[in-house]
Amino acid sequence: MRNSQRAIVAAIAISLFGCDALAPDRWDAFVYPDANDLTQWQTLIGFKDFEQCQSAAIDAVRALRDPDAGTYECGRNCKYDPAYRLNVCKETRR
């Protein structure tokens, strides 16, 4: 396949699937100091994979004033949705 044909195929793929389909996954951690009040959280962003996200989140929970009260979740490819005033993720895990 010639370079011009590859460029056309790439342009079609981007238009069909969007830039997000070509971007690598990004994991963000959401740390909640009080597991009973999920309206307060701290965000740690930009991890390459779930394991890195989970490790950072657990470290952050352990550093809380009351670690037993806190919790966390990790989200893949999260985007803030202003309509709902929260982050919407393709996937979340704990």
Image (spheres, rainbow, N blue to C red):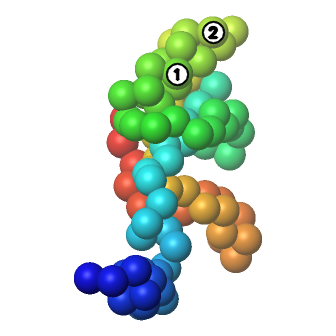
- x and y percentages locating residue 27 in the rendered image: 49, 43
User: What is the C-alpha distance between the residues marked 2 and 1?
Assistant: 11 Å
Q: What is the number of the mark on residue 86?
A: none
For this view, does 31 lie left or right of residue 24?
right
**Residue depth check, mark 2 versus mark 1: number of the one nearer the observer:** 1
- x and y percentages locating residue 73 in the rendered image: 47, 38
For this view, does 30 lie left or right of residue 53?
right
Question: Label 1's element?
Answer: helix
Amino acid at dot 1: Ala
Image point 46% across, 38% down: which residue? 48
Task: Give the residue number, with chain letter if any, for mark 2.
Answer: 63
Amino acid at dot 2: Ala
The answer to which quarter of the image holds residue 40 is top right
- x and y percentages locating residue 8 in the rendered image: 42, 90
| Nearest to N terminus: mark 2 or mark 1 | 1
Nearest the viewer among 5 and 57 is 5
Image point 50% across, 47% down: which residue? 26
Q: In which quarter of the image is the C terminus?
A: top left
Task: Give the residue number, with chain letter if any, for mark 1.
Answer: 56
Q: How crowded is mark 1: few (under 14 residues within 10 Å), some or many (20 or more)?
A: some
Nearest the viewer among 14 and 43 is 14
- x and y percentages locating residue 30 in the rendered image: 58, 38
The answer to which quarter of the image holds residue 22 is bottom left
Residue 36 appears in view: no
Nearest the viewer among 32 and 28 is 28
Image point 71% across, 64% down: which residue? 85
